[in-house]
Amino acid sequence: MESRRPGPQSDDVDLGQLFSKLGTFFSDTWMNFIRFLATIRRTPVKNKWSFLAIIVASVALGFILNQYVRKNYYESTMILSSTYLNKRLAENTIEKLDILAGEENKSQLAKVLGLHDSLADNIVGFEVQPFVAENDVIELEVLKEQLRGAQTNANNQEVITQVIERIEIENRHAFEITVRTLNPSVIPDLQHAIVGHFRNNPYIRKRIEINRENLLGRKEKLTRDIEKLDSLKSVIYANYRNMADQSRQGSNNVILSDKAVTDPVDIYNQDLLIYNELQDVDRDLFLQKDFEIVDGFTEFSEPASASSVTVILYSLLIGVVVAYLDVAIRTFNSYLANFQ
């Protein structure tokens, strides 16, 4: 009797079944998607009265809130730079002001900023974030690429990653402060109040005072040095003039010394360097570069809050979503009723 050997299995049959199942899956998925779109399209038609009532109610509620409840606010930003400011100090200070601005009674905010209560009542909130100049961003990216290029083995990758993260969280000394108010006319007063609030911080105030004292002391010393150099220049000028007069009279006097004679040009150059340094000190005293406003607040006439048209559109969208949810809940409730 001949033994029956199982015939070879065809891979073509298995692939054909696989492609057939995939085709059926995609076809069913597409049809389900079409049915879903058809349901969404059919639902408002079948429930037009409930849709209309919910949408009208939502738009009316949005209009009432926009006209009688919601208040428009105005927003402006300034850039404050100080060598004494760091990220933690700036964020902590502005966060406290923002909390005070959120209180119903703004008297404490008015006291802290040194404002009249009527001005403080118009303040809505504050925000702050580090301000990084474009040049700093470029330098940071270049440094990061250099660090990556310096990688020699896998063990250095963790160190390089930590250095990059440290650079990215480095405390910057310039910050962008945002203020939101109900009345744009109070914004200029807020600029002086916020700057004064930072200046009155004990940590910053002490450093500003000692830095100013150091600059004044440096200015006094440079002024004395210039006066001495002026006297020296006068003596040198008189000596050279005397020598020139004697030369014209036929004198052949020669000065012999084992020490190098000071070049008068060096004295004049040194005087010029000290004078330029004195000008830099005067400029620092006048500009107060250790604490200055890079870009102040601007009083805008247009509110930063959403316009009436935007509020109505959002209300319309919310009304449509609520109407669909209402139909879905009622349909699901009817489905559950069949099991009772």
Image (cartoon, rainbow, N blue to C red):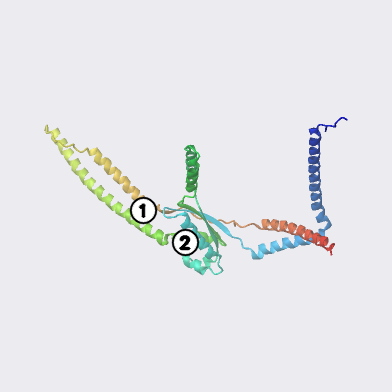
Residue 227: image x %, image y %?
24, 49
Q: Is residue 114 above or below residue 215?
A: below
The local secondary structure at tag 2 comes to helix
Q: Residues within 10 Å of mark 1 (few under 14, many from 20)?
A: some
Please tell me which of labels 2 and 1 falls first in the chain: 2
Q: Which label was assigned to residue 325?
A: none
Front-lying residue, 86 or 230: 86
Q: Give amino acid for label 2.
A: Ala
Question: How far is mark 2 from mark 1, CA to CA?
Answer: 22 Å
Q: Residue at x 67, y 56 (%)?
A: 310
Q: Give amino acid for label 1.
A: Leu
Residue 123: image x %, image y %?
54, 63
Quarter of the image that includes the C terminus: bottom right
Q: Residue at x 27, y 40 (%)?
A: 269
Q: Does residue 309 appear in this view?
A: yes
Q: Residues within 10 Å of mark 2 (few under 14, many from 20)?
A: some
Left or right placement of residue 203 versus residue 153 in this view: left
Return the residue found at the far top. Answer: 2
Residue 118: image x %, image y %?
53, 67
- The residue where tag 1 is placed is 285
